[in-house]
Amino acid sequence: QKEVEQDPGPLSVPEGAIVSLNCTYSNSAFQYFMWYRQYSRKGPELLMYTYSSGNKEDGRFTAQVDKSSKYISLFIRDSQPSDSATYLCATVLRAGSYQLTFGKGTKLSVIP
Amino acid sequence: DSGVTQTPKHLITATGQRVTLRCSPRSGDLSVYWYQQSLDQGLQFLIQYYNGEERAKGNILERFSAQQFPDLHSELNLSSLELGDSALYFCASSVGEGPYSEQYFGPGTRLTVT
């Protein structure tokens, strides 16, 4: 069982839809979670990060963590074609090494 | 543009060969990370260097090695290449060495082993 699980999709939605992207994790050393966005043929870029439980909002994006169920979510409101990308969640599973463990990514297409 | 540069962009080589991938971090960043991305495994952490010293090792094969030089650029050496080593290899850099230090990814090197 992979320690950070993410539905690979692909996910296809119409422009303007609300998108929900999800990950589950087995453990997190620092309760620190990240969402990366990766456009085709590019490197990942940090989209949002959040600590512990609760919500964090940044424009059209909201990151949510539910520690009790070990579930993290990224919501995209009013989705745009420019949001079409692969979204990867990540966390540090074990203290000491600080290495990030990524989910496999969910490929999102927003159709105009 | 993240400010992290990687060369070459593409590399095609044969099984059994050895290749070197190069990474220049963003100006001021002391940490360099190497990742391998394949369709079946996703993005996998290989190794991290901080200011010239190895800091963390992930799923890096013994056939692979890396180093960070005094000017902070890094090289990833892959030897005795196998078909399964075909993947995208990303370098990332950050100012600090801990988990809260944002990592900036380069554009990657696409390695094809034939």
Image (cartoon, grey):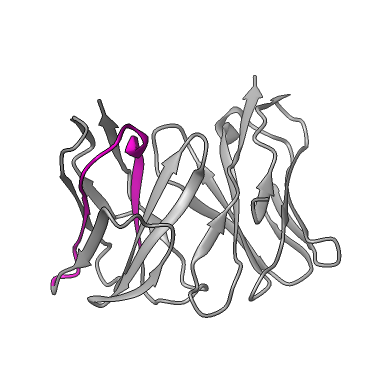
Residue occupying the point 86% across, 67% down: A68
A76 left or right of B56 in image:
right
In the image, residue B14 sits, relative to residue A99, either above or below, namely above
Instruction: Please tell me which residue is depicted at 56% across the width and 37% down the height of the picture.
Output: A86
Instruction: For the C terminus of chain B, give its image quadrant.
Output: top left
Point out the stretch of residues depicted in magenta: B71-93
Q: Which of the 4 image quarters holds residue B108? A: top left
Q: x%, y% of residue A38?
A: 49, 41
Q: Is residue B90 magenta?
A: yes
Residue B59 location (% of width, % of height) = 43, 57
- Residue A1: x %, y % from top left: 68, 50
User: Which residue is found at the position 59% from the left and 35% from the top?
Assistant: A83
Residue B90 image point, x, y percent: 35, 49
- The residue lying furthest to the top in this view is A112
User: Quick one: B98 or A77, which is closer to the camera?
Assistant: B98
Furthest residue in direction right, as rendered? A68
**Would you place residue B12 above or below residue B35 in this image?**
above
The reply to whether residue B18 is visible in this rendering is: yes
Left or right, B7 with respect to B35, comes to: left
Answer with left or right where residue B41 lies relative to residue A23. left
Residue B20 placement, left or right of A78: left
Q: Residue at x 35, y 67 (%)?
A: B48
A78 over A94 or under it: above or below: above
